Amino acid sequence: MSIEVRNITKTFGRFTALCDVSLSVPSGQLVALLGPSGSGKTTLLRVIAGLEHPDGGSGSVLFHEQDVAGQHARDRHVGFVFQHYALFKHMTVFDNIAFGLTVRPRSRRPSREAIRRKVQDLLRLIQLENLAGRYPSQLSGGQRQRVALARALAVEPKVLLLDEPFGALDARVRQELRQWLRRLHDEIHVTSLFVTHDQEEALEVADRVVVMNAGRIEQVGTPDEVFHQPATEFVLNFLGHVNVFRGRVQQDRVVFGSLAVDAPGAAAAEGDEAKLFVRPHELEILAHPGRFDCLPARVARIQSAGPFVKLELLAEDGQPVHVELSHDQAGRLGLRENDTVYVRPRQSRVYLGQYSI
Amino acid sequence: MAGTIAFRSSPVSCKVAARPAITEPAAVRWVLIGVSLSFLGLLLLIPLAGVFVEAFRKGAGAFFASLRDPAAMAAIKLTLLVAAISVPLNCVFGLAASWAIAKFNFVGKNLLITLIDLPFAVSPVISGLIYILVYGLHGWLGPFLAARDIQIIFAVPGIVLATLFVTFPFVAREVIPLMQVQGNDDEEAAITLGAGGWRTFFRVTLPNVKWAVLYGVILCNARAMGEFGAVSVVSGHIRGKTSTMPLHVEILYNEYNFVAAFAVASLLALLALATLALKSFVEWRSRRPFIEAPEPTALEDLSHEH
C-alpha cells in the first residue's frame, strides 16, 4: 500500500518541524527518513501515523490514494514501532503481541485459537518462539524491539512505521537487527518507513532514502543516488565525512590555493566564492608533486586499525584534510607521521552559491 | 560489582549500598542511630504503647464494652462511611487530574498543579471554616439550601465534603510524577494497535500506575479516617450522629472517660499500624515490577541463526 504526503506543515509553538513537505512512498518499499535531530523526520512519521496533526487544514496524507487525514490513529491501520519499544510491562510477550487482536470489538475479534496461532507464527518470524511467557523486563533490547515489531505486525497493518527502531541498541546489535529487518521486509513486503539519524543504517537497509533537514526534504533517491549524486551541500555533508576547500572562481577554473578545478561555464561568476567537496576516499596521495595540480600537506596522524587507513593531514594553511586509503596503497607509500605528501582529488564536487557543477 | 537495576515506580526511598567513601567511624554511626532511635522512641513508640496501656487499664471487658457503646459504634460507622465515599471519589479525581496533567498540555495546567497542593498548604481548620462560610446557615448558599431543607453543615454531607477536601491531593500526588516519567508511548502504541480510549486506560495506563494509585489510596484512607481539624469545624459534634472516631475520642476525653477514649483511640492506632504495613508492602511490591533484571543468557541469539 503506497503512502503519499502532500504539503504538510507542522509547527510546535514557534518551531517549524515540517515546512510544506510532500513525499510519496511506493507500495512495498522500505524507505528511510534520514536527518539530524530536529530535522522533522519523526514528526513526519507521526503525522503519517495520525499521532500528530498537521497545522490547520494544511496538506493531506493518503494511503493507497485514499485520504486518511480525517481518520483517528486507531483507524488508520498502521503498525508503529517506537524507539524505546513501548512494550506493555505488565503483559507477557505473548499478550503484548496479541494485544492488537484482543482489543478488537467482539464482532471482529478472532477466536482465541486463531489469536494463539497468529502469535505463534509471529514469534517464529521474530525467532523468539520459546520466550512467549516472558515479561519485557526479562528480554534484551534487541529482543524487545523484535517483540514490538511483531506486536505491530499482528494487526496486519497497511503500512509499517518505525521511529528510530534501533536507536536504543548497542552497535553490534543494531547491525544485526537492521540486516534482519531487511530480510524480514523482503519476506513480508509491507510498505515501511523508518526514521534514523544513522546514515550508514539508511544506506544499508533502505530501498530509497529521504534526506531531511530543518523541516524540509533535501533529496529523495536510492542509496546510490544520495551518496554519489547528492543534490545539495547538506546531503553531501550529512552522508559521510567530507573535506571542504574554499576558493574563488577565476575565468573557467575554480582555484583553491595550489589546486584548481576546471569549471566550464563558471566564468559568469568570476571572483565569486566557491566550495570544493571531496570525500576522504576520493583523495589521492602522491609522494611527489609530479605534473598534476596538488596540495602539499603534512601527515599529522595515521590510524590504521580498521578496514581503511585513515590519515589526518594538515594543509599549508593549517586546514585539516582527511584521507582514507586502502592498506595496500598506504603500504606502497610507506608513510610516517610528519612526512610531507601531495594530495589530489580524483573526484570532486564544486558548489558555487546554490549551483553545483 | 554485579547488581540488579530494579525499575521503581513508587516514589520514596531506594536502597543505598554502603559505600566505603561515605562510611563514618563506628562511634559516629552508633551516635546517629542512637539519637534517631531514642527520638522515635520518646515521640512515637512510648505514646503508641501508652494508648494501648490506657485502653486496657480496666481490663479487656471495659475495653470491649466501651467499643460496644452505641455512640462509639455510630462514630465507627460514620468514619467508615466517610472513608467509603471520599476515598473512591478522590481516587477517580486523582486519576483524572493526573491523566490531564501528564498527558495533555492545556492552559491553566500549572494552576491545577498548584491547586492540587492547596489542602497541604492550608490548615484543615481553615478549610472547615470555608465550608461553613459557603454552606452554613448564614453562608453564601445557606438561605438557598435552607429553603430546600438541605443540611450540609453540622451533618454528614459537610463531614464528607471537608474530608474530600483535605484528602484530595494524596492519589494525584502519587500518580502525576509517575505518569509524567512514563510518557505517552504506551498509550500511543495501544492506540495505533486499534484500542479505544477506555480500553487503553484500563489495559495499559491503569496497570502502569496501579501501585502508585494503591499507595495513594492507602494514605488517603488513613487521612480520611483520622482527619480531625476540618471535620471538627463542620460536624457540630452531635454525639452518635455527626461524630467521627477522632471527634468521639475528644468528646470522651473531655468527659474524663479515659478508658473509652483510649479504646477508640487504639482503633485509630491500629489503623495507622495497618496503613504502615500496607504501605511498606506496596513499596516493596512496586519495586520489583515483575521479575528481576534479565538473565544475561544469549542476549542476542540472532547471531547464531544466520
Image: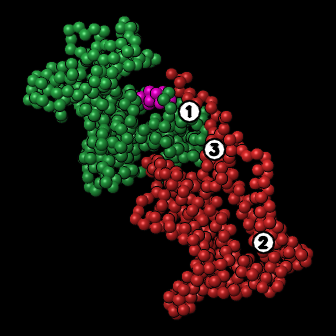
User: Given this view, does label 1 or label 3 mark the residue nearer the observer?
Assistant: 3
Residue that numbered label 2 is attached to: B267
Q: Pointer 2 indicates a residue of which chain?
A: B
Q: To which quarter of the image does residue B161 belong?
A: bottom right
Residue A33 is drawn in which quadrant?
top left
Instruction: List x then y, in percent, for residue B130.
Output: 55, 82
Residue B302 coordinates in the image, percent (x, y): 53, 27
Does the stretch in magenta take in A223?
no
Classify B62 as above or below A147. Answer: below
Q: Is residue A322 visible?
A: yes
- Badge 1: chain ID: A
- Mark 3 sits on what residue? B6
Can you tell which chain is drawn red?
B
Kind of residue indicated by mark 3: Ala
Q: Residue placed at 25% from the left, 29% from the top?
A: A230
Q: Which label is found at residue A128?
A: 1
Q: Is residue B118 left or right of residue A263?
A: right
Q: Quadrant of residue B219?
A: bottom right
User: What chain is the green one?
Assistant: A
Q: Residue at x 85, y 79 (%)?
A: B259
- Tell me whether marks 1 and 3 sit on the same chain: no
- Say above or below: B134 vs B225: below
Task: Say left or right for A10 vs A112.
Answer: left
- Residue pictured at 72% horizontal, 77% vertical: B246
Q: Amino acid at mark 1?
A: Leu
Magenta span dominant secondary structure: helix
Q: Which residues are magenta?
A: A173-182
